[in-house]
């Protein structure tokens, strides 16, 4: 029987990324101080100033391979990566793109395991409700490591098949596919293009779709960053739900409300059940 598919992002969607990220941010800042030779009050002032800049200058975003691929303000993981890049630029450090990319990857991988475990309210109940519905299959597709995410959901008691947690999705990687959709688009309120062809993420979603003999219309994708998690699947034809928080950029919210047939803003996880009932 043809299934309907619900795909969740993980950090910031199923979890409270800001609460979880407190130890991550603390350790990451310490690493930056050491790497850049910053000390005392100057170090704190510099890091605070740059973090505020990343929160407010929306066009800065997350730079991956020389392109801005997502806002950097929405969760602490992206924000700290952008802080590091801005700091390295200011100080003229780690200028070789390959070295910098390796270093940023290292800092993320080193500090991510320090993150706490803070699930959004109702996470277990929402997954249980969906998993008990024989017409629905559930996946988690995330940029984070598969094992780290699997161990968190096992701890919460979510009984999701192991191969339904897909980490390393590289939603930030821009490529040539799918070539059936435009490479980029402009939206009001943002002074930079949005890149649509996220080739690796597309491959992951397409494999899920094909595995269940589904069409794009049979998918609901839920994420906390429209540009990273949702614009590609929406362009392909899926339904989407944007989990907003206080750092969600206004242009992302405004875009969502223009497409009520297939896109909704949500503030809590239990609202996903309503999306399944009304959109899928
Ligand atoms: Mg997320």
Image: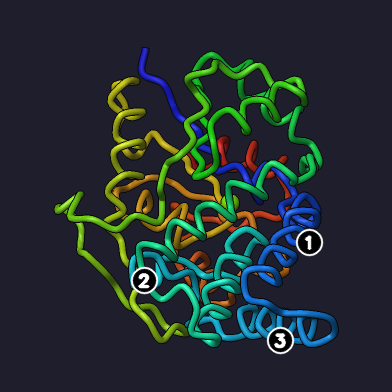
Cα distance in 3D space between marks 1 and 2: 26 Å
Closest to the observer, 3 or 93:
93
Q: Is residue 94 left or right of residue 124?
A: left
SS class of the residue under badge 3? helix
Residue occupying image coordinates x 40% and y 56% = 172
Cα distance in 3D space between marks 3 and 1: 15 Å
Closest to the observer, 253 or 174:
174
Who comes first in sequence, dot 3 or dot 1?
Answer: 1
Q: Position of residue 123 (x, y in %)?
A: 74, 35
Q: Badge 2 is on which residue?
A: 96
Q: Position of residue 41 (x, y in %)?
A: 84, 85
SS class of the residue under badge 1? helix
Ligand 1 closer than 8 Å to the CB at disc 3? no
Q: Position of residue 102 (x, y in %)?
A: 44, 56
SS class of the residue under badge 2? loop
Q: Is residue 222 above or below residue 277?
A: below
Quadrant position of the N terminus in the picture: top left
Residue occupying image coordinates x 49% and y 35% = 167
Q: Is residue 122 left or right of residue 132?
A: right
Q: Position of residue 152 (x, y in %)?
A: 70, 30
Q: Badge 1 is on which residue?
A: 26
Residue occupying image coordinates x 54% and y 81% = 58
Pointer 3 local density, CA inside 10 Å: few below 14, some 14–19, many at least 20: few
Q: Residue furthest right?
A: 41
Q: Which mark is residue 49?
A: 3
Do residues under tags 3 and 2 come within 8 Å of each other at their CB atoms?
no
Residue occupying image coordinates x 43% and y 70% = 63
Cα distance in 3D space between marks 3 and 2: 24 Å
Please tell me whether mark 1 or mark 2 is closer to you in this view.
2
Please tell me whether mark 3 or mark 2 is closer to you in this view.
2
């Amino acid at each position: 029987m043809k299934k309907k598919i619900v795909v969740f992002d993980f950090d910031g969607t199923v979890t409270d990324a800001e609460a979880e990220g407190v130890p991550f941010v603390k350790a990451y800042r310490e690493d930056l101080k050491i790497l850049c030779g910053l000390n005392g009050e100057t170090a704190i002032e510099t890091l605070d100033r740059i973090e505020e800049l990343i929160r407010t200058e929306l066009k800065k975003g997350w730079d991956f391979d020389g392109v801005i691929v997502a806002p950097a303000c929405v969760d602490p993981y992206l924000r700290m990566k952008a802080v590091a890049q801005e700091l390295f630029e200011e100080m003229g450090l780690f200028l070789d793109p390959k070295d910098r990319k390796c270093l940023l990857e290292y800092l993320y991988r080193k500090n991510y395991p320090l993150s706490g475990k803070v699930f959004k309210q109702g996470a277990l109940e929402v997954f249980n409700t969906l998993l008990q519905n024989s017409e629905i299959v559930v996946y988690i597709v995330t940029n984070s490591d598969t094992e780290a995410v699997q161990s968190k959901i096992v701890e919460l008691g979510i009984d999701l098949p192991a191969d339904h947690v897909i980490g390393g999705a590289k939603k930030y990687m821009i490529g040539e596919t799918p070539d059936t959709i435009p490479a980029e688009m402009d939206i009001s309120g943002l002074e930079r293009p949005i890149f649509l062809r996220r080739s690796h993420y597309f491959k992951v979603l397409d494999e899920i779709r094909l595995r269940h003999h589904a069409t794009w219309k049979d998918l609901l994708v839920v994420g906390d960053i429209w540009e990273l998690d949702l614009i590609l699947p929406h362009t392909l034809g899926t339904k989407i739900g944007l989990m907003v928080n206080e750092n969600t950029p206004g242009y992302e919210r405004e875009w969502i409300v223009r497409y009520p047939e297939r896109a909704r803003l949500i503030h809590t996880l239990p609202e996903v059940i309503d999306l399944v009932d009304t959109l899928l």
